[in-house]
Image: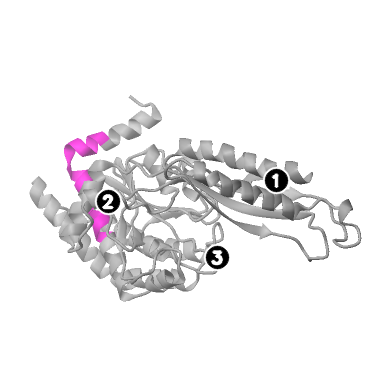
Amino acid sequence: MSTTPLPRTDAERSAAAHAHCRASVQRHEAELVELSRSIHAEPELAFAEHRSAAKVAALLARHGFTVRTPVADLDTALVAEAGSGELVVGICAEYDALPEVGHACGHNVIAAAGVGAALALAEIADDLGVTVRLIGTPAEETGGGKVLMLECGVFDDVALAMMVHPGRAEVCRPTSLAITDLEVRYTGREAHAAAAPELGRNAADALTVAQVAIGLLRQHLEPRQMVHGIVTAGGAAPNIIPAHTAAVYNLRAAEARSVQRLENRIRACFEAGATATGCEHEVVRISPVYAELSPDGWLSEAYRRAITELGREPLDRGEEQGQVIGSTDMGNVTQALPAIHPMIAVDCGDAVNHQAEFAAACATPAADRAVLDGAVAMAWTAVAAALDGAQRDRLLATVRDRSGRS
């Protein structure tokens, strides 16, 4: 990996860095598109993204990055670094897929765009005074890989973090909902459904009571609170009183405190099912709580300038207010340090994320273009932060504040 010196004046350095990053991404275009398409072709679920993580690690190692894996006790997490500057730029790569519909959230695009940005920045890292850190973050769809990596210190010295996420629209500063996911398990007693039903304790009825209670609760939900779930175990045969049932529910709200209030009420609904039927129950939290996005304003505007310069047309700031993208563990990162999670548009027709049609759209020329544009825009955003003295000082100060250093 070579290091390219930049001119000395601020304006010349910025222009030269922009040109270099764009040229680097163009030079690596075939590798980046192949990475995106290859991850897309072999979808892997949360914490089992072994092939995807290996592909990301191998490409970066081939270009001179120092790669560590596993990280944070997660087999499919990785950290790849280049450069040695004080300003640590974290670029998050996701690569987990969804059950049944594969890469219907476009994490293959996220991973490849992140790798492209890292490659572009690495070549001028020393001149920018940055360390480029590609952070491979598993289990975004469920499991909270970024939350676990935050807790293990992977982001402790990161001054700014970023990623781009494919979607229907170009949104520089999207809104997300906080989320927690709960599994409720009911235990009753089997009995012959016809010969001795009075001896049973019907766990399916317990779940039905809980579902009715949740349905009645909906009229009292706070604005932007949401509850949705599926039954994952409902009994073995109609002539056996079900002794074991289970369901998984997502609870969402505008912010984490509202999620906690909602959780208290949903747990009461679960308990009602057990009380009404004489069953036992337990509630298990599946993933860490995902916080709502709180993107950094300055970095968001730097990204807006970058993506606009590339010919894309992001929604204006007023239109962005209504763009809720679901939930993401990147929210926790944005709560902890300056970070952004913009959406980059792919041509998907009427499809939306988590539909099979959107998965198909994430392996098309439009998705390939999103990989390349997303890589350049993130690299340019990092360049802007590195070369702006006031912003560089601000970002480094946040690291010192988090660590308690003076």
The total number of labels drawn is 3
Look at label 1 and name its amino acid: Gly
Query: Disc 2 vs disc 3: Cβ atoms closer than 8 Å?
Result: no
The image shows residue 177 at horizontal and vertical percentages of: 42, 46
- At numbered mark 2, what does the secondary structure look like: helix, strand or loop? helix
Query: Disc 1 vs disc 2: Cβ atoms closer than 8 Å?
Result: no
Q: For mark 1, does the 10 Å Cα neighbourhood hold few (<14), some (14 to 19), or many (20 or more) residues? A: many
Looking at the image, is mark 2 or mark 3 earlier in the sequence?
3
Magenta stretch prevailing secondary structure: helix
Look at label 2 and name its amino acid: Glu
Mark 2 or 3: in front is: 2
Cα distance, mark 3 to mark 1?
29 Å
* Mark 3 lies on residue: 99
The image shows residue 72 at horizontal and vertical percentages of: 52, 46
Residue 123 visible? The answer is: no
Label at residue 273:
1
- Magenta stretch bounds: 375-394
Mark 3 or 1: in front is: 1
Indicate whether residue 382 is drawn in magenta: yes
Look at label 3 and name its amino acid: Pro
Cα distance, mark 1 to mark 2?
41 Å
Cα distance, mark 2 to mark 3?
30 Å
Q: For mark 2, does the 10 Å Cα neighbourhood hold few (<14), some (14 to 19), or many (20 or more) residues? A: some
Looking at the image, is mark 3 or mark 1 earlier in the sequence?
3
* Mark 2 lies on residue: 320
Q: For mark 3, does the 10 Å Cα neighbourhood hold few (<14), some (14 to 19), or many (20 or more) residues? A: some
Say which of 372 and 186 sits in front: 186
Toward which corner of the image does residue 343 lie, by quadrant? bottom left
